[in-house]
Amino acid sequence: MSVNELLPLLPAGVLVVFGLLLLLYEVFSNQSEQRRYSAHLAVLGFAIALTVVAFQLRDPTASLFLGPGGLASLVVDAFARVAFILLMVAGLVACLLSPGYAKNAGHSLGEYYGLLMFSVAGMMIMVSAADLATFFVGLETMSVAVYALTALRRRDVRSTEAALKYFLMGAFATAFFLFGLALVFGTVGSLHLTHLAEAMSTGTTLLREPLLHVGLLLILVGFAFKVAAFPFHMWAPDAYEGAPTPVTGFMAVAVKTAAFVSLLRLIVVGFDGAMSSQTGGASWTVLLEALSISTILVGNALALTQRSIKRMLAYSSVAHSGYVFIGLTAVAEGEASAGAGILFYLAAYTAMTLGAFGVLAYLERREGGSEAERFGAYAGIGFRHPAASALMALFVVSLAGLPPTGGFFGKLFVFSAALRAGHTGLVLIGVLGSVIGVYYYLRVIVAFYMRDVPEPGPTPSATPSAELGFGLLIAAILVVVLGVVPGPLIELGRAAIASLG
Amino acid sequence: MRPESYSLLYLIPLLPLIGAATLTLVGARLPKALVVLVALGGSLGAFAASIASTWVFYRLQETPLEAVLWEWIAVGRYTFDFTLGFDALTSALILVVTGVGFLIHVYSVGYMKEDPGFFRYFAYLNFFIFAMSILALGRSLPVMFIGWEGVGLASYLLIGFWYSDPEKALAGKKAFIVNRIGDFGFLIGIFTLVGLFGTGDFQLLKEAAAGLRDLDEVLKIGIFAGYTPRAVITFACLSLFVGACGKSAQIPLYVWLPDAMAGPTPVSALIHAATMVTAGVYMVVRLNFFFSPSVAPIAMHVIAWVGGLTAIFAASIGLAQNDIKKVLAYSTVSQLGYMFLAAGLGAYSAAVFHLVTHAFFKACLFLGSGAVIHALHGEQDMRRMGGLRRPLPVVFWTFLISTLALAGVAPLAGFFSKDAILARAFDVSRPLWMLGFLGAGLTALYMGRLLGLTFFGSARYNAAHGADVGHGADAAHGHGTAKEIHLHKPDLWMRTPLILLGALAAVAGLLNLPHVFHLEGVAGGHALETQWFDHYLSSVVGAPQVLLDAGIEWLLMGVSVVWAVFWLFAGYAIYRRGPSATLERATRSGPARWAHVVLREKWFVDEVYEYVIVIPVRTMASFFALFIDPFVIDGLFVKGSALGVRSSGRGLSWLQTGNIQSYATVFVVAVAAIILWAV
């Protein structure tokens, strides 16, 4: 195998190299004055990697690390590359949002950015893995890095608690996932998606093997845990609340995107897009349907009762997982356009969620309050921080799914694909959930603009960091552009789904 | 003809959009000169881009141009691209919009220079040019609809520009609400056409319309199964026409336009006279392959009759108004009626021609009235004007030219355009011609009256000032009350557009001489070029028709001119010395009094709407607000369901103990349940 053959993995390589560089930089720069450049270094790394992907976007599908039978462990196709872009944009924006926050919280650490880059590299392995063992390696690379990120504020009790909970539950879920892998391997004799697809195709006796189903279900549980779907979501609010706010944003979007995209590949390639009828007792669509309905209802109901904006956003991100599951249900029934819709949804979700958490990180810092601030603490903030509040308004409007924002088209594409697959009831639930969502998202705007300020709040002292402003700007532009010119991205999404074959 | 790709079309909307965005974001901090530069740059740039596009269009032997900007929405089997198109019809409208728009920008610099909202005003104005060019350039119904809503928004913002005055804010609201009714119809129309043909693109719709084999064959599939295509198209046309009635102020939705005069006068000139209000006419002509006597005859009858009735009805109200802008507003409604009359009769190019000439002379009239109001420190009541001919010569002469043009005196622009409409009406339907002809007389009469009251006689503005007569809509713009009025003479910014528009009002008729002018040997041995505009538009609306016999046409023209001059002079003669005492006495009792009251109170239409629609709706709303809403909606649905959601949320929160052991337990139980269910 020559070096040239590794070129498709160059973006991940760039990230790893920069991650290592950051660790070295951390060791050799002992003054915090110097350390502030670590964020810039990380952003540079992401920018270079993104440029590389952009150049490779139209390249043919590359199969790497061929195993027995000529089957590749990693497949870098258009689908994987689109996912690379989503993940790296999330990483880049998260890096931009962090420095100001980190400085205030007293943990401006180089390893923070290193960990972030390692986790994105892991995600990139996940989304391009063609075999579940390779996938598992990516999954763990990502997970370990994110556990550490959550625990970053090690002197803060809540942060440590959140990290420990996340880690314990994660280990728990990983065990289930691994057990599922073992069962599948035991019945099919391989963990490669192609073999899985062969085994799943009609008429195989394997299908009557209950252990295969149990194995697959356990794998699904592993995914459901990572995307915080009901009833495997319980870690999410605690972890989201305790983690440093930019990390929360990153966890909420990148981890989810990686998990959903690889699940999409698993369903389309591994199950050949058709798993409703032949799987005997376990109809996957019914299961996915149940997951999405319960996740939407529970996520929204819980978000509604929250008093802290951060926790509300955490629960609402659970609800968003439910909407994506609607799309997955349609994909499972062979409706390919739902796949493009999911990619679009994830892109819009990345932009708007990171943006919302970014504004929150900024306001927490500026107002000097604690992180679990209630809505009331933000009364009248729209007049003290007009720019940040206007952006927040944009992001929550998009999260609520109102036009002309990316969130609207994300929902539109996913829901219309599900309608085409005949899931009217599911879409109704989705719309109902969105209506509940409008209520609690608009509460943010109400708090920001329409509540009287009890007393004149502290006047802002520092100017916002340029990095943060830049990061929020990127997110805002993405939200608006996706809401006005959705065509190119959905086109890209279609091409990506088509590359899965 | 396959359209030629010309991507620079996007500059036409983009430049004013940049202007609007710049002014909105940083306008407050810019010095006035820079605001002017940005605003004029945006509108002049759009005008230049329109000229360039027209030139390219002309050089390519009038091949339509298009610019596909992006794929906009793709849902199911429907795909909507964001496409701009440019053909003969577009070029006519866009040149008027950006050209007249630019002149009015120039005028506004002088008119608004002391207003504290200077930058905000120009931000809105640039935004309007942007939205209007989207409306004109949009190559499909959905894109057009964006412009349609955009100009509505700009109109609302500018009517209520002086929003601290509740009356003006209310006028903005009224315009908005009445237009919502129209827009609802417009949307229904769009949905119907998209539902029937699967596309909103004008080019594809036109091809689809041409491909319909039998209009009266009942459809068997699709959402309109059971109806004939003709019925569906007629329904769509009527729905779209409801939208046109709202935007273009036709019966019964015209009521917002007179109130819209609350906005600054240049806005009335641009939006509520020259451009936006003609959007409905443009839309009907744009869709002439549906709005056609052979496809949807019923809809066409409705349009022609609504147009004709509006023409005469609004003109009659214009007779008895004392506010100078209100007279012009009713005149606009009436002239728009003429355009619909023409469109309804299938005389599309006559409708567009009248649209163009009307834009020139009516914009000039409004700007002139603005100059008068400006000179008199916000006075709008014509009874307190008079004698302005000498102190404001430029205003007077341009106003006079435009008045003659509006009244239809040869050889000014309005004569040719109105005559084209009346000739067609005479040929097709005598009753409609009668309406138009009587309307023309009324038009000349109220314009004569306006001219006499404003510019002739003695100056009444000094004496009467301070008396409680009328409420100047531009009063906020005034500069306090002085006993002896010092006239504010228009500056160069204001005079230049007046002169240019006056000149256009005088000569624009040459664009489309009637065919009877096709005389050999007049112009240096060649025949005069006639019906140039008709031929120019023929690629969109079909070849021009010559229907009337030359002799009859000469006769009609002669009669119209005499008719117009007679009534114009009558109006002038009665009112040149100020409000006529004789008339006042005559209208003090008997039927004349009633006629006067009815006209002055605008046929009580606003009152009728108030009692028939507004009050019942409000009563119903109160009923719902007092009984249904708190108990059923709020109590049962909202609070009930909220309680349900909330308590289920609380219940679930109870599970959310923060205790990791319980999380793990839930996890395991869930996995077990799933496996048990599945296997």
Image (cartoon, rainbow, N blue to C red):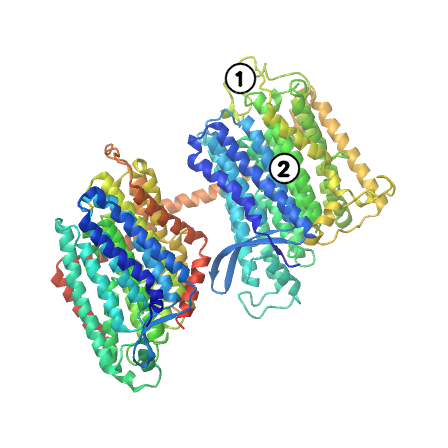
Q: Nearer the viewer, residue B632 or A171?
A: A171
- The image quarter containing residue A339 is bottom left
The residue under label 2 is: B332
Percent across and percent down for residue A29 are: 19, 47
Residue found at the very far top of the displayed protein: B484
Chain under disc 2: B
In screen coordinates, is A334 left or right of A233? right
* CA distance for labels 1 and 2: 30 Å
Q: Nearer the viewer, residue A211 or B462?
A: A211
At label 1, the amino acid type is: Gly
Image quarter hosting the N terminus of chain A:
bottom left
Q: Is residue B587 visible?
A: yes
Residue found at the very far front of the displayed protein: A2
The residue under label 1 is: B466
Question: How many numbered marks are there?
Answer: 2
At numbered mark 1, what does the secondary structure look like: helix, strand or loop? loop
Q: Is residue A304 visible?
A: no
Q: Residue at x 71, y 27 (%)?
A: B571
